[in-house]
Image (tube, rainbow, N blue to C red):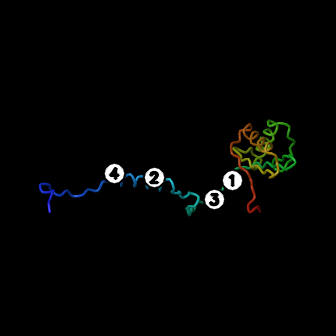
Amino acid sequence: MMNFRRGRQREEPEINLIPFIDVLLVVLIFLMVSTTYSKFTELQITLPTADAEKVQERPFEINVTIDAKGNYTVNNVPVAFHSVAGLAEDLRNAARNGPNGQPARDPVVIVNADQFAMHQMVINVLEASRVAGYDKLTFAAQTGGQK
């Protein structure tokens, strides 16, 4: 029996890591692409409570009502709409008859619009409020509506 490996030492086998790293990178990219991220809307949070006293002095409110037929009222007084400037003057007149007969400073305009009122009618109230210089405006809505 002849031994051809007489002068050589036995070499230890090595593991080649380059193909292993390539496979791991492909798996990592696949996992990153296929992962779904949770949405923030699914977070359950408990809001903190504040023991602040209620505001004693409420701001003067100007209630503007718009019905489905396009009729406007300002503080339950029907007004005829001719222009945005005319509606702004009606808002100023309502603010002049403020609490205790004094002119109201910085009143809040509350828009009570019928759900079938045209969008342009609500925009007219927004524009009239801007022209009159009243920058506090809110919309009224009812709660618990059936869909």
Instruction: Choose the circle earlier in sequence order: 1 or 4.
Output: 4
The crowd level at tag 3 (other Cα within 10 Å; few <14, some 14-19, many 20+) is few
* Neighbour tally class for label 4: few under 14, some 14-19, many 20 plus, Cα within 10 Å: few
Q: Report the amino acid beneath label 1.
A: Arg
| Viewer-nearest of discs 4 and 3 | 4
Q: Horizontal and vertical percent for residue 128?
A: 76, 39
Measure the C-alpha gap from mark 2 to mark 3: 55 Å
**Relative depth, front residue between 112 and 76:** 112
Pointer 4 or 3: first along the chain: 4
Could you say whether the residue bearing mark 2 is in a helix, strand or loop? helix
Q: Is residue 78 above or below residue 83?
A: below
Determine which residue is flagged by label 3.
54
Label 1: state its secondary structure. loop
- The Cα atoms of the two marked residues, 2 and 1, are separated by 59 Å
Q: Quadrant of residue 39?
A: bottom right
- The residue that label 2 is drawn on is 29
Which residue is rendered at x = 58% and y = 61% of the image?
42
Q: Is residue 119 left or right of residue 54?
A: right
Counting other residues with Cα less than 10 Å from the Cα at mark 1, is it few (<14), some (14-19), or many (20 or more)? Answer: few
Question: Which is more N-terminal, label 1 or label 2?
Answer: 2
Quadrant of image for the N terminus: bottom left
Are the residues flagged by discs 4 and 3 in contact, CB closer than 8 Å?
A: no
**To which residue does mark 4 refer?**
18
Residue position marked by numbered label 1 in the rendering: 58
